[in-house]
Image (cartoon, rainbow, N blue to C red):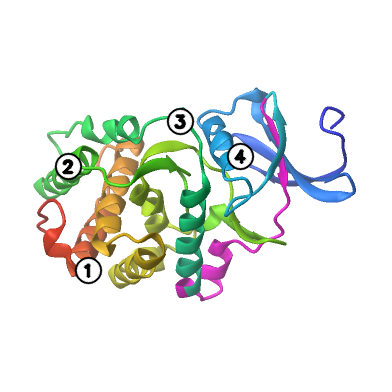
Amino acid sequence: MTRFGLCEAVLVDQSKIATVWKVKRAGAAAALKIYHDGDTQDEWPGVAFVQSCAGIGAVEIFDHADGAIVMEWLDGPSLGDMVHAGDDARASAILGVTAAQIHSNTTARNLPFLDDRIATLLMFKHQPHWPSAVSQTITAAQYLASQLIKKMRNIGPLHGDLHHDNIRKGPRGYLALDAKGLIGDRAYDLANAFLNPVGADDLVADCARAVRMANTLAGPVNTPAHYLLDWAIAHCALTLAWENAALPDVTMLSTLMRARLLCDGADTAIGEFNV
């Protein structure tokens, strides 16, 4: 508090890796995020990403040091809250606009590579006890991911964790926060949104919703809907590799594959799926 010149701290949230406080900075509200034991894990490159946005489409970071960040206070609601309130279509539209804003303004450098993140999926080992349908679905996703990495298009700095709960409303409008920071195909930045928001399981699992979202996002980010879904498939499979469960649940992965086949232009997408 002394280091950053803050006062009036009120606890807001505590996650596995950090605690967030609402504070006063020069008489105005701000957010103080303190990482447990100073361990920022994989989020520190995201600070550089958000700073490079210079407040355009992303929260403004006022100061940072020693595993702590002081940033613009966003009262909310989040786009996740908007979805839970029944306006998924508007949330998707704002998500697309926000992605376009941060991608057009960031100049971040020296970020981790998307290739290295996807490598976890490509090295994901199949197990003999998996049913053939599970193995075939993951194999298809792995092949798709390998082709996407080889043929990346619009390469640039990425938020790395852009989804409904990481975009909140503040005095300046809806802004992205809590970035991871990557370099790669910008279509990947919207991949995680297809698995969100948290707590909207039935909606997220709806194939028609995935198609609607892809079509809504395609315009603002100037990217074909089926290509956004290709990256969503790759990311969904990546989450299975991260989880490394004894038997992966490929239900959502299959849903995204079906959605991709229903999109306009799906015949030109990479890979073939039997779902």
Residues 102 and 178: in front is 102
Tell me the element at label 1: loop
Amino acid residing under circle 3? Leu
Label 3–label 4 contact, CB within 8 A = no
Q: Residues within 10 Å of mark 4 (few under 14, many from 20)?
A: some
Q: Which residue does the image show at 56% across and 69% down from the upper left? A: 82
Cα–Cα span, label 3 and label 4: 13 Å
Give the residues in magenta.
Answer: 67-89
Amino acid residing under circle 4? Gln
Label 3–label 1 contact, CB within 8 A = no
Q: Nearer the viewer, mark 1 or mark 4?
A: 4
Mark 4 or mark 2: name the one nearer the start of the chain.
4
Label 1–label 4 contact, CB within 8 A = no
Cα–Cα span, label 2 and label 3: 22 Å
Q: Which residue is mark 1?
A: 263
Q: Which residue does the image show at 47% across and 72% down from the upper left? A: 88
Horizontally, residue 267 falls left or right of residue 171, namely: left
Tell me the element at label 3: loop
Q: Nearer the viewer, mark 4 or mark 2?
A: 4
**Percent from the top left, x then y, of residue 102?**
51, 51
Q: Which residue is mark 2?
A: 147
Q: Which residue is mark 4?
A: 51
Q: Which residue does the image show at 40% across and 49% down from the upper left? A: 189
Up/down of 88 relative to 52, above or below = below
Q: Residues within 10 Å of mark 1 (few under 14, many from 20)?
A: many
**Percent from the top left, x then y, of residue 246?**
27, 37
Q: Which residue is mark 3?
A: 111
